[in-house]
Amino acid sequence: MAETIRELISEQDVDKRIEELGQQISADYEGKSIHLICILKGGAFFMCELAKRITVPVSIDFMSVGSYGDDTVSSGSIKIKKDLEESIEGKEVLIVEDIIDSGRTLCYLTDVLEKRGAKSVRLCTLLDKPERRVVEVKTDYVGFQIPDEFVVGYGLDYAQKYRTLPYIGVVEGV
Ligand code: IMP
Ligand code: MG
C-alpha cells in the first residue's frame, strides 16, 4: 500500500484553536512579557502562528532536543542538540512544542529550564497524546488531545517529510 495522509484536523480548525490559545495566553499573562522557547524543528510552525496572536510583549528563542531519529519509536534518551542563545533568568518562560507523546522530552526540558532560574516555566503544546504518556508532564495549554496515532503536518514530520502540510494528518500505509 502506498503512503497516504488522512486529514485529522483541518487547517481551519487548527487556526481557530491557535487563535483561542493566543487569547487565553494573552489574558493569563496580562501586564507581563513572555519569553517563548520554541522546540525545533516541529514547534516552529506553531510558534510563529501563536506568537502573532499574543497581545502582550513577546521575545523568542530556540532550542533543539533529540529523542527520535527518523523513526516513529522513541529511543527514550534526550539530549540538547542546540541550546538557547539568551539567559532565561527571571523570565516568564513558555515552552512551545508540537506534540507531547511519552512526555520524556518535556519532562527533561522543564526540569533543565527551571534550574536555570526562570521566574516561571509553563508549557504550551499544539497536540497531546495522553494515552502514550510514560512520564508525567504538566501541560498548561493544549491545542488538541489526539488518539494514539502517528501524525504529521503543521511542523510534524515523518522521516523529515510532510512538515509543511497546513493541516494535521495521519500517515497510513507505512
Ligand atoms: P516525547 O518525548 O515522547 O513526548 O516525544 C516528543 C517528540 O516526539 C515530539 O517533539 C516529536 O518530535 C516526536 N513525536 C511524537 N509523536 C509524534 C507524531 O505523532 N508525529 C511526529 N512526531 C512525533
Ligand atoms: Mg519534536
Image (spheres, rainbow, N blue to C red):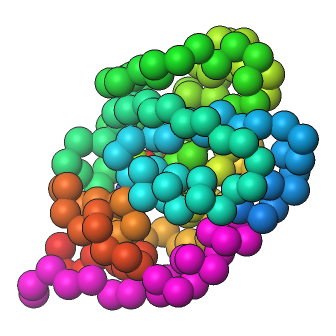
User: Which x, y percent locates residue 29?
Assistant: 85, 45
Q: Which residue corresponds to the image point at 75% horizontal and 30% vertical from the top-left?
A: 92
Q: Which residue corresponds to the image point at 19% horizontal and 63% vertical from the top-left?
A: 161
The tally of labels here is: 0
User: Which x, y percent locates residue 156?
Assistant: 36, 60
Left or right: where does residue 166 sit relative to residue 148?
Answer: left
Residue stretch in magenta: 1-21
Q: Tell me: residue 76, above or below residue 115.
A: below
Q: Quadrant of residue 144?
A: bottom right
**Does the magenta segment cover residue 9?**
yes
Q: Residue furthest left?
A: 2
Residue 150 appears in the picture as rendered: no
Left or right: where does residue 83 sit relative to residue 124?
Answer: left
Left or right: where does residue 123 sit relative to residue 174?
Answer: right
**Does the magenta segment cover residue 139?**
no
Check the picture and name the quadrant holding the C terminus: bottom left
Viewer-proximal residue among 153 and 86: 86
Q: Tell me: residue 66, above or below residue 101.
A: above
Check the picture and name the quadrant holding the N terminus: bottom left
Viewer-proximal residue among 34 and 93: 34
User: Which x, y percent locates residue 145?
Assistant: 62, 69
Residue 4 appears in the picture as rendered: yes
Q: Tell me: residue 148, above or below residue 88.
A: below
Q: Which residue corresponds to the image point at 56% horizontal and 77% vertical from the top-left?
A: 15
Q: Which residue corresponds to the image point at 80% horizontal and 55% vertical from the top-left?
A: 26
Q: Tell me: residue 104, above or below residue 143.
A: above
